[in-house]
Image (tube, rainbow, N blue to C red):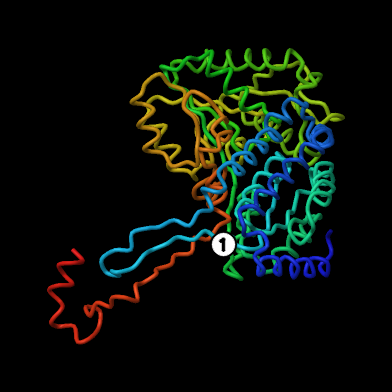
Amino acid sequence: MSDINQLQALMQEQKKVVREGRLFPVAARRERLSALLQGIKKWETPLLEALQADLGKSFFEGYTTEIGIVYQEIREAIRHLPSWSRVRRVRSGMASFPSKGYRIPEPMGMALIFSPWNYPVQLSLAPLTAALAAGCTCVLKPSRYSKEVSRVLEAMLEETFPPEEVAVFQGGSQENQMLLAEKWDTIFFTGSPTVGRVVMEAASRHLTPVTLELGGKSPVIVDETANLDLAARRIMWGKLLNSGQTCVAPDYILVHRSCREKLVEKLVAASKTLYGQNPLENGDYGKIINQKHYDRLCGLLESSEKEGCQLHRVSREPFCDDSLKIAPVILTGVNWESAVMQEELFGPLLPVMEYESLPQVIEEIASRPSPLALYLFTSNRDHARRVLQSVPFGGGCVNDTVLHLTSSNLPFGGIGESGMGQYHGKAGFDVFTHYKSVLASSVHMDLPFRYAPYGKYEKIIRRLMK
């Protein structure tokens, strides 16, 4: 679907479903989550094949980083939905005595979900899972760059759900503008900060709440106490997932000057261990999504060489125009003004800079836009405490990378320019839910304190409300 008339007709149907409360009962929500689970199982192989076609992902990586995570989210929601959806009693306070307070979770209504191209299955179906758990209807707008996955997602969801509950809207920037011109009850967007600003501006015209999952330059700090072998292995694993096209991938390293040379050597060695002497011929190593992004990354490498940066390549074949693969590159001689430090890299390029003191590195990171992720490798608990307390970031790991987003109990989201709002598990249910606050007052007792004239009750009220 990509036509404005079809969209508006669809929205009227979804509004009707919302008004009638068809998706409100817990049983109805669990039924739809189960339908989504069975639909993914049925379409699992086509989805994995589409991921391989669009991004060169192996079936193992496609399953573990995309489909498997969605399975976990769906099962978590099915298991806990009765508890999440329960009306909760809260204390009402002396000012409203005698009364009872309640928080009633209800669906936000019609949800518009924009998903990106880099993890096109996970970042489409995980938000969809949260929206269905909350009882919302959904229109999913997948990326035009991951065209094979978008095609399979549309076929799968058309077979699994009626369009008045879940529909897919295809297209590019023109279709995005068409969708954003309409009034939704909530918008969930995953993508770049630049487009996130466009989404937020459009949503503000209708006062529509938004959840923005953006990105940024996620740093890795490696201090002088770190286990360098482990750090190198885990950094390169996180960096080279999806050929670096991960919003929480390690974007650059700040390493203590005493161990910079050793770390660089170990990073190169770890990369070769993961994907061999020629990763361009390794079936487990992914490709860049399209020619535009491939050319951008090649241009950054060319600019870096001109700036005098040292490029530590892990392969004699640095890139392949035909397959759109770029071999991993570690860059040293980098500073904050270097070309590779001006934008999120979203590729297998890894700049390394050195630092002298922990306060210095904390100040450098904290003075820049808050990243979506931060990773710290250390054996010093005090260093970990100081970094975690002093630097704002969305989420991260100590002595690991990326894995924090695999836990349903760790809400995922950014802060500042890296996003707003969180999801996964209960947090995903919450982001598509409005908690209606209700006070039920007694009709059997009506205390006179709140009614004028007030003078004679002032002392009593002050005593009760202290």
Q: Residue at x 80, y 49 (%)?
A: 160
The one of 124 and 71 positioned closer to us in this rendering: 71
Estimate how packed mark 1 is, as few (under 14), some (14 to 19) or many (20 or more) residues with alpha carbons within 10 Å. Answer: some
Picture quarter with the C terminus = bottom left
The one of 84 and 170 positioned closer to us in this rendering: 84
The quadrant holding residue 3 is: bottom right
- Residue 89, relative to residue 385: is it above or below? below
- Residue 232, relative to residue 240: is it above or below? above
Residue furthest front as drawn: 444
Residue under pointer 1: 209
- Measured as percent of width and height from the top left, residue 83 is found at 51, 48
- Residue 196, relative to residue 71: is it above or below? below
Q: Which residue is drawn at 65% across and 58% down?
A: 136
Residue furthest right as drawn: 322
Q: Residue at x 57, y 47 (%)?
A: 81
- Measured as percent of width and height from the top left, residue 122 is found at 69, 40
- Measured as percent of width and height from the top left, residue 357 is found at 37, 26
Instruction: Tell me if 112 is positioned left or right of 91 in this view.
Output: right
Q: Which residue is drawn at 50% across and 15% down?
A: 228
What type is the residue that disc 1 sits on? Pro
Counting labels gives: 1
- Measured as percent of width and height from the top left, residue 406 is found at 58, 33
Mark 1 lies on a secondary structure that is loop
The one of 4 and 157 positioned closer to us in this rendering: 157
The one of 117 and 298 positioned closer to us in this rendering: 117
The quadrant holding residue 21 is: bottom right
Picture quarter with the N terminus = bottom right
Instruction: Tell me if 162 is positioned left or right of 336 in this view.
Output: right
